[in-house]
Amino acid sequence: MIDFIYFSLTGKCNLNCAFCYASPSCQNTREFSFNEIVEFLRVFSINGGKGVQFTGGEIFLRDDILEILSRAVNFGLQVNIITNGTLLTEKPINFIKNNRIDITVSIDGPQEIHDVFRGMSGAYKKTMDCISEFNKRGIHFSLQTMVFPSQFEKQLVWLEAFAKNSLHKYTRITDVAPEGKGARCNQLLWPYENLKAIPEAANALTRRANYHKIFFTNIISRKEMEYYYPGFENVLKPWIMPDGYIYPFLTHNKNWRLGSINEYPNLCSSVLQRFNDVCRLAYKKALTKQCFSLFNIIAETSREVPESVKT
């Protein structure tokens, strides 16, 4: 059963992040209509769907985003959204609070780092203004921070200071995904031998925050994987791209297409079989690493295509 899915509603964005995982084809493709999205969410919810995370691009560029979120909530789905926080006005902020939407805001450290890597002067201020409104209204949110090898220490100092004055629930510290622009920015990617610095820093930050603010990461050691994740079925989740095609994880490799939302749930059993094959392939690859990023394993796995995925 596929109970959770990532849904990229748009490839469009008002920022120009140096590491954006959206590919040019994703940014320029036709987006599925409101009715098509709602119909999928309805069918997904009655066929075992429990939760959905809406991502982009920037989802608040869609004029119908609040109605999409509203329908998802009405279908009984646990709704998560991720946003850069620069476009949220009073109406969406009130909607998020009233509907208890689980929201993650992306911010990568102090202004001089965030604005440069997000490709827009003033982006930091707009995002912090949004966070300030959340704090004023008692909205508990999560933070996602993309860390870069050359800026890591400065980012950690900022994160510790931020945690002391915020209502956010937790901070996800993550490396750059080698997809889209990220695949072409080698200076932003973390070598395997340096990855352990990220979870070590997350643990240290949590201790210094007296465990009130939880810092975690997508970096996993082989020992942790073998103990907590005897397979990847509960870690990897399928993705839907803006054109409606379903992929087993974050990739733009068309060879990995598992179907489209218009075919769901008729293809559910085949999608699940193919998805499980992908999880086994990724798990086998991860067993060869002492410490790994899920993004790295996904990128390596996406270079291969199991027989069951080939069409």
Image: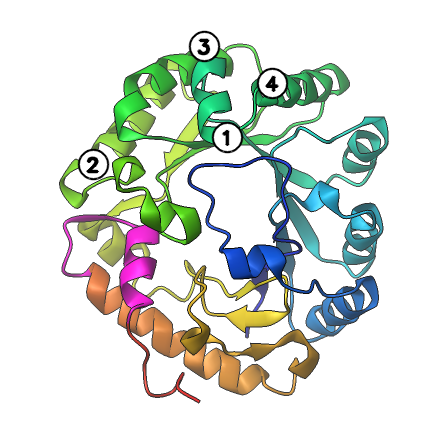
Q: Is residue 123 magenta?
A: no
Return the residue at label 3.
Answer: 161
Instruction: Please state if 168 lies on the left or on the right of 304 as rendered.
Output: right
Instruction: Please state if 300 lies on the left or on the right of 254 as rendered.
Output: left
Q: Looking at the image, do the residues carrying marks 2 and 3 touch, with CB atoms under 8 Å apart?
A: no
- Say whether residue 213 is visible: no
Which amino acid is tagged 3? Ala
Q: Looking at the image, do the residues carrying marks 4 and 2 touch, with CB atoms under 8 Å apart?
A: no
Disc sitting over residue 118 in the figure: 1
* Marked residue nearer the N-terminal end (4 or 2): 4
Whether residue 155 is situated above or below residue 220 in the rendered picture: above
Disc sitting over residue 196 in the figure: 2
Whether residue 191 is situated above or below residue 88 in the rendered picture: below
Disc sitting over residue 122 in the figure: 4
Q: Quadrant of the C terminus?
A: bottom left
Mark 1 residue crowding within 10 angstroms, few (<14) / some (14–19) / many (20+): many
Q: Secondary structure at mark 2?
A: loop
Q: Secondary structure at mark 1?
A: helix
Q: Secondary structure at mark 3?
A: helix
Residues shaded magenta? 287-303
Rendered location of residue 241, percent (x, y): 58, 63
Which amino acid is tagged 2? Lys
Disc 4/disc 3 C-alpha distance (Å): 20 Å
* Marked residue nearer the N-terminal end (1 or 2): 1
Rendered location of residue 107, percent (x, y): 52, 27
Q: Quadrant of the N terminus?
A: bottom right
Disc 4/disc 1 C-alpha distance (Å): 10 Å
Whether residue 99 is situated above or below residue 212 in the rendered picture: below
